[in-house]
Image: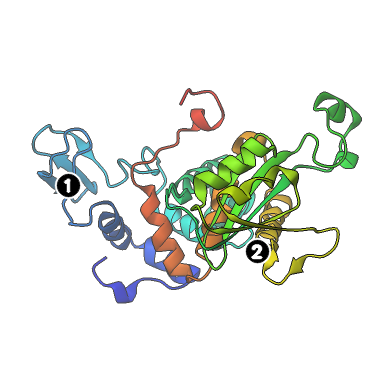
Amino acid sequence: MNDIAEFPATLADAIKYFANPDNSLNFMVSIRWQDGKAVCPKCQSTDAGFLSTRRLWKCRDCGKQFSVKAGTIFEDSALGFDKWLPAFWMIVNAKNGISSCELARALGVTQKTAWFMLHRIRLAMQNGSMDKLSGEVEADETYIGGKGRNMHRDRKIKNNIKTGGVGKAIVMGLLQRNGRVKVKHVANAKRPTVQGEVRQHVQAGSEVFTDTLRSYNGLEQDYIHQAINHAECYAKGKVHTNGLENFWSLLKRGIRGTYISVESFHLFRYLDEQAFRFNERKNNDAGRFLIGIVGIIGKRLQYGELIGKLSV
């Protein structure tokens, strides 16, 4: 960015700002190559000339031509940044998410294209931080899926869907109070699974608050573990899981109200999306956009991989 003061603060500003090809290119260069020197994706040389008429670079060592999209989630996309960057702005700041149909109408692309765009952006929003949570940490699990009573009898029989959580996807959550949340689609809510997640992501010696699910019994060996019995009350002083209950409410509002139907094999992508927005809840729209856009580098998602027709 040549002039940080001009950087947009709202979606309307972002649409105008990134509609200018020079603004978009300069912004992407500042994200992709912070020192301003383009790096050849083939030979890693920094000796490249800019072809202004095509907005490409040509490596003087190996002769390869490449764009600023190379090595990012935007690679091989025919769409311009005038569509990509406003789309990115929209999803990182939409509290309940944005559907592919809505994005398609807003950008003037097909629903299929918008769906692919959203999944590529979700990939950029993934945070692979290995930092452990500490202090006061809440642990809880929830079930994602349609209600059995609303399903056709044949589908219930095929998927063995009954009442309660049977046949639904299980999501495990860990929340550091006044901090970050980590969520994961897990196979079950048994003791080795839930305690394994806690021990992997929570620093030993921290205070861990859960409900009375027996799977959490034994955490007191490594943590200060206290449980709240929801059959009696929702909180006893600081012993509660209300922070995660709030996150579950936001997550399910997006899945049920915006996305309607989420396949279990794509669920982790929607979890990453909601976790990103929650973890950046104290930031403003421009701040969330700038933090999220950094995640485009070194990641790629092909359509065949997304629909299961291309091996990872």
How many circles with numbers are drawn on the protein?
A: 2
Mark linked to residue 51:
1
Q: Position of residue 32 (x, y in %)?
A: 28, 51
Q: Looking at the image, which residue is at 53% across and 23% down? A: 309
Q: Nearer the viewer, mark 1 or mark 2?
A: 2
Mark linked to residue 180:
none
Specify whether 252 is left or right of 268. Answer: right
Residue 161 in view:
yes
Name the amino acid, label 1: Leu
Q: Where is residue 40 in the image (x, y as percent from the top left)?
A: 19, 39
Q: Looking at the image, which residue is at 8% across and 35% down? A: 61
Is 71 drawn above or below residue 106 in the view shown?
above
- At mark 1, the secondary structure is strand
Q: Looking at the image, which residue is at 65% across and 34% down? A: 187
Q: Looking at the image, which residue is at 60% across and 38% down? A: 266
Q: Position of residue 114 (x, y in %)?
A: 55, 46
Judge by depth and name the residue closer to the eye, 145 or 129.
129
Q: How is the image coloured?
A: rainbow
Q: Where is residue 12 in the image (x, y as percent from the top left)?
A: 49, 70
Is 163 drawn above or below residue 252 in the view shown?
above
Disc 1/disc 2 C-alpha distance (Å): 52 Å
Dot 1 and dot 2 residues touching (CB under 8 Å): no
Residue 100 in view:
no
Q: In which quarter of the image is residue 44?
A: top left
- Which residue has dot 2 on it? 243
Dot 1 or dot 2, earlier in sequence: 1
Judge by depth and name the residue closer to the eye, 244 or 4.
244
In the rendered view of the protein, which quadrant contains the N terminus?
bottom left
Specify whether 149 is left or right of 197. Answer: right
**Few, some or many residues within 10 Å of mark 2 (<14, 14–19, 20+):** some
Q: What is the residue that sits farthest to the bottom in this orientation?
A: 5
Q: What is the residue that sits farthest to the front in this orientation?
A: 221
